[in-house]
Amino acid sequence: MIDAPILAYLVETAQGRILYDVGCDYRKIAAPDQRRHYYSGFALGAPEMSAAHRLPARLAGLGLAPADVDLVFLGHPHFDHAGGLHDFAHAEVHVHAGELAAAREPADLAYFAGDYRWRPQRAEYDLMPGVRAVETPGHTAGHMSLLIELPQGAPILLCGDAADLVENLAEEVAPGLCWRDDETMALASIRRLKALAAETGAELWPNRDMSFFRPRERFPTPFR
């Protein structure tokens, strides 16, 4: 049992704003009937999500609205990463094409039907100058991480759920959930992330490690 955050990252570039992941659908958590329908199969129940945690409220803290986001990039479309798409119906939505088939199976309980309005992508590519999608499958069939160059200092490599915790990277341990219960791709992606960080000088950011994020500046202070 760990205290794990559900994160979204706003990346501001000269060409537009990118949102990496959009968190949960707060409507499915707040409404008792939907909460029972969607989360009754989860041993831990629904995530905790107050009104202040909803992305429109978070964006408002930066003086922004959902309409100010130009592109949504999903690491993968599990409910805790893609649920909030309803607030960004105007935006272009990118996700790896390999996730389409996995979501339609569905490959696991974390894919919720109806959360998907996306533009399928393949391989690695630049979303905008200085922001590169990196294929890191294993947790899911088509998981993607994001390499971000900064105006100053080292780049940041957002691992997404390819590496939840510092120990996934340090000890090369696969995430707790792997696509088709096979750790092979997940471990290869962890090694790929580490190699890319060594090559670019990027700082690796695991996705659910509270001890990693607590020392960092708290929202809404922008990271620069």
Image: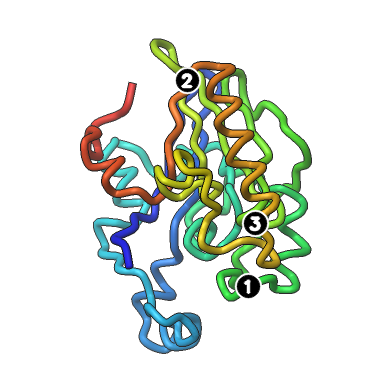
Q: Position of residue 37 (x, y in %)?
A: 49, 87
Say which residue appears at 64% left-offset and 42% top-offset. Answer: 189
In this picture, is 173 found above or below 132? Answer: below
> For the N terminus, which image quadrant?
bottom left
Q: Amino acid at mark 3?
A: Glu
Say which residue appears at 24% left-offset and 32% top-offset. Answer: 221
Viewer-proximal residue among 118 and 212? 212
Say which residue appears at 41% left-offset and 48% top-offset. Answer: 165
Q: Which residue is mark 1?
A: 108
Q: CA distance from mark 2 to mark 1?
A: 33 Å
Q: Which residue is mark 2?
A: 155
Q: Position of residue 41 (x, y in %)?
A: 49, 85
Q: Amino acid at mark 2?
A: Pro
Q: CA distance from mark 2 to mark 3?
A: 28 Å
**Classed neighbour count for the residue bearing mark 1: other residues with Cα under 10 Å, few (<14), some (14–19), many (≥20):** some
Q: Are marks 2 and 3 in contact (CB under 8 Å)?
A: no
Q: Are marks 2 and 1 in contact (CB under 8 Å)?
A: no
> For the C terminus, which image quadrant?
top left
Q: Position of residue 10 (x, y in %)?
A: 43, 36
Q: Position of residue 9 (x, y in %)?
A: 43, 40
> Element under label 3?
loop
Q: Which residue is mark 3?
A: 183
Is residue 20 found left or right of 126 in the rendered image?
A: left
In this picture, is 82 found above or below 38? Answer: above
**Classed neighbour count for the residue bearing mark 2: other residues with Cα under 10 Å, few (<14), some (14–19), many (≥20):** some
Colouring rule applied to residues? rainbow
Q: Amino acid at mark 1?
A: Asp
